Image: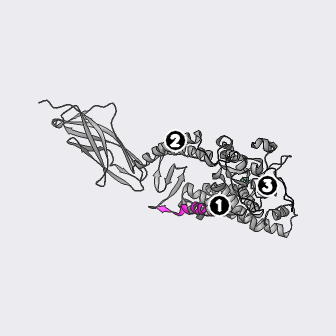
């Protein structure tokens, strides 16, 4: 018996949140409770503390995390990453995509229900406030259909005022990650005419968050989110997902007192549907709309305890696990993804381990051999550039090793400002009598305030003095 044979598949032709006439079918989910809901609440407390707390954490006077796309300034865990770290960014992005694919192939859409900011804010912040003000789902339905009276105006006014304040808070935090906390403070303390860009951005983000969490809600997961759209190709029969055990549950039917029934364990109480924030019936099978929030597991486990049946009629399991009774198996696809991910993570780790605070490149000026100088001296011209990835200015000195010679910086002294790139030229002058070959290997030692930073290998061209 498979899922198709067991269940009516006509639900796949429609979306639960859209009525037949095309209008929005507003979802009023029942207030969830249970082990999974409590666990999600704790996870959300931790994630929200991280999200709102991070912009306040600084290291050496700089934000711990900053994603300033406007100035291409990225600080991750106190380390500055600039355009010259593009290769690390690119590999990290590929690794992240593979990780998401791999994670989804194994654990399904767990990210959506437990980590995604949309679900965390919607289900564990805004929805909790809604339950507090409007009551549980039946009260909410009643309030919606009731005429506008004092009570309704008060409740709506209170709820949307709180939603607006939280939306402002989220917008400020979001901006702090983009432009830094100091800039946000400046925007907040200046008049709108002084910083119109910041003022407009702050209010646009606030209105966007307010719109999403007050009205758009689950539509963000069902219609907009590209990750949600990809579920159809990322999941297979072996992926873990919130799944209804149709073999154990069917044929469903209401319990009748004192009558022995030849039915499955599902008592058709509808509670798993009532709690669903995306308005679906998980008993129809794994669906694209399911964000794996596990609210239906809690609801059904509660029912199973009451009717003295084992928990887990709805549980985290794969479709093949339900059909065969076997637990998760390691598929070929998962093996390939894992191998690629391990390789990518290893490369990124090596790149990060070898990443230095200062990057120096020295190249003999192309198209030039050597210059003859007075007093039997020979010089070579070099271009060099220094990338300062630290938050302090640097005074760079160059010394030569491997040959007796003198370095003469051309132009301004190599003072490299924080997070800036310096480009300059220098001349290496060598006595002809000290040259033993036409092409000599030389080391240029790069120092900052007397401290050796790097040694760059290059060459010196010249003519060997005749005996
Ligand atoms: S079906 Fe269950 S896990 Fe999926 S969204 Fe609905 S309540 Fe959450
Ligand atoms: S909560 Fe459990 S018993 Fe009730 S309808 Fe859903 S699957 Fe059936």
Q: In the rendered view, would you say 179 is above or below 455? A: below
Which mark's residue is nearer the viewer, 2 or 1?
Answer: 2
Q: Point out residue 467 in the picture as x, y percentages from the top left corner.
A: 11, 30
* Side (left or right) of 430 relative to 173: left
Please give the residue where the numbered disc 1 appears in the rendered image: 40
Please give the residue where the numbered disc 3 appears in the rendered image: 266
Tell me which segment is drawn in magenta. 45-58
Q: Point out residue 460 in the picture as x, y percentages from the top left corner.
A: 26, 36
Residue at (71% x, 58% y) in the render: 311
* Side (left or right) of 436 relative to 277: left
Name the main secondary structure of what is drawn in magenta.
helix
Cα distance in 3D space between marks 3 and 1:
25 Å
Please check the rendered image and state whether residue 47 is part of the magenta-colored stretch, yes or no: yes
Which disc number belongs to residue 339?
A: 2
- Please say if the residues under marks 2 and 1 sit with CB atoms less than 8 Å apart: no
Q: Point out residue 80 in the picture as x, y percentages from the top left corner.
A: 46, 52
Which disc number belongs to residue 438?
A: none
Q: Who is closer to the viewer here, 75 or 341?
A: 341
- Please say if the residues under marks 3 and 1 sit with CB atoms less than 8 Å apart: no
Which mark's residue is nearer the viewer, 3 or 1?
Answer: 3
Please check the rendered image and state whether residue 353 is part of the magenta-colored stretch, yes or no: no
Kindly state the secondary structure of the residue where label 3 is placed.
loop
* Side (left or right) of 415 relative to 3: left
Earlier in the chain: of badge 2 and badge 3, it is 3
> How packed is label 2: few (under 14 Cα within 10 Å), some, or many (20 or more)?
few
């Amino acid at each position: 018996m498979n899922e198709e044979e067991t269940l009516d598949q006509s639900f796949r032709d429609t979306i639960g949140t859209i009525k037949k006439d095309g209008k929005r079918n507003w979802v009023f989910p029942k207030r969830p409770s249970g082990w999974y809901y409590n666990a999600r609440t704790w996870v959300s407390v931790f994630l929200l503390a991280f999200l709102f707390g991070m912009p306040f954490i600084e290291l050496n006077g700089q934000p711990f995390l900053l994603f300033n796309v406007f100035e291409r300034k990225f600080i991750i865990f106190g380390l500055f990453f600039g355009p010259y770290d593009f290769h690390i960014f690119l590999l990290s992005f590929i690794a992240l995509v593979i990780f998401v694919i791999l994670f989804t192939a194994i654990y399904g859409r767990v990210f959506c229900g437990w980590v995604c900011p949309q679900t965390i804010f919607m289900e564990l912040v805004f929805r909790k406030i809604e339950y507090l003000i409007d009551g549980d789902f039946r009260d909410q339905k009643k309030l919606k259909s009731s005429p506008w009276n004092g009570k309704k105006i008060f409740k709506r006014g209170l709820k949307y005022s709180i939603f607006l304040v939280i939306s402002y808070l989220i917008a400020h935090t979001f901006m702090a990650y983009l432009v830094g906390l100091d800039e946000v403070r400046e925007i907040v303390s200046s008049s709108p005419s002084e910083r119109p860009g910041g003022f407009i951005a702050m209010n646009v983000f606030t209105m966007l968050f307010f719109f999403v969490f007050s009205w758009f809600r689950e539509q963000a997961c069902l219609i907009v989110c590209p990750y949600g759209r990809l579920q159809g190709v990322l999941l297979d029969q072996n992926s873990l997902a919130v799944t209804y055990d149709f073999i154990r549950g069917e044929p469903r039917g209401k319990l009748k007192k004192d009558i022995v029934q030849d039915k499955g364990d599902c008592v058709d109480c509808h509670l798993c549907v009532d709690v669903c924030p995306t308005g679906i019936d998980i008993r129809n099978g794994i669906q694209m709309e399911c964000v794996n929030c596990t609210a239906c597991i809690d609801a059904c486990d509660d029912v199973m305890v009451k009717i003295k049946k084992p928990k887990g009629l709805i549980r985290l399991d794969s479709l093949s696990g339900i059909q065969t009774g076997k637990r998760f198996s390691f598929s070929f696809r998962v093996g390939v993804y894992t191998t690629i991910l391990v390789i990518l993570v290893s490369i990124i780790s090596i790149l990060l381990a070898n990443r230095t605070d200062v990057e120096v490149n020295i190249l003999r000026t192309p198209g030039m051999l050597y210059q003859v100088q007075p007093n039997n001296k020979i010089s070579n011209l070099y271009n060099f550039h220094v990338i300062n990835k630290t938050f302090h200015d640097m005074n760079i000195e160059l010394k030569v090793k491997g040959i007796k010679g003198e370095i003469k910086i051309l132009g301004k002294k190599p003072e490299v400002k924080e997070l800036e790139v310096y480009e300059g030229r220098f001349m290496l002058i060598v006595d002809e009598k000290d040259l033993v070959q036409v092409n000599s290997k030389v080391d240029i030692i790069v120092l900052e305030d007397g401290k050796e930073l790097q040694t760059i290998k290059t060459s010196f061209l010249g003519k060997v003095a005749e005996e």
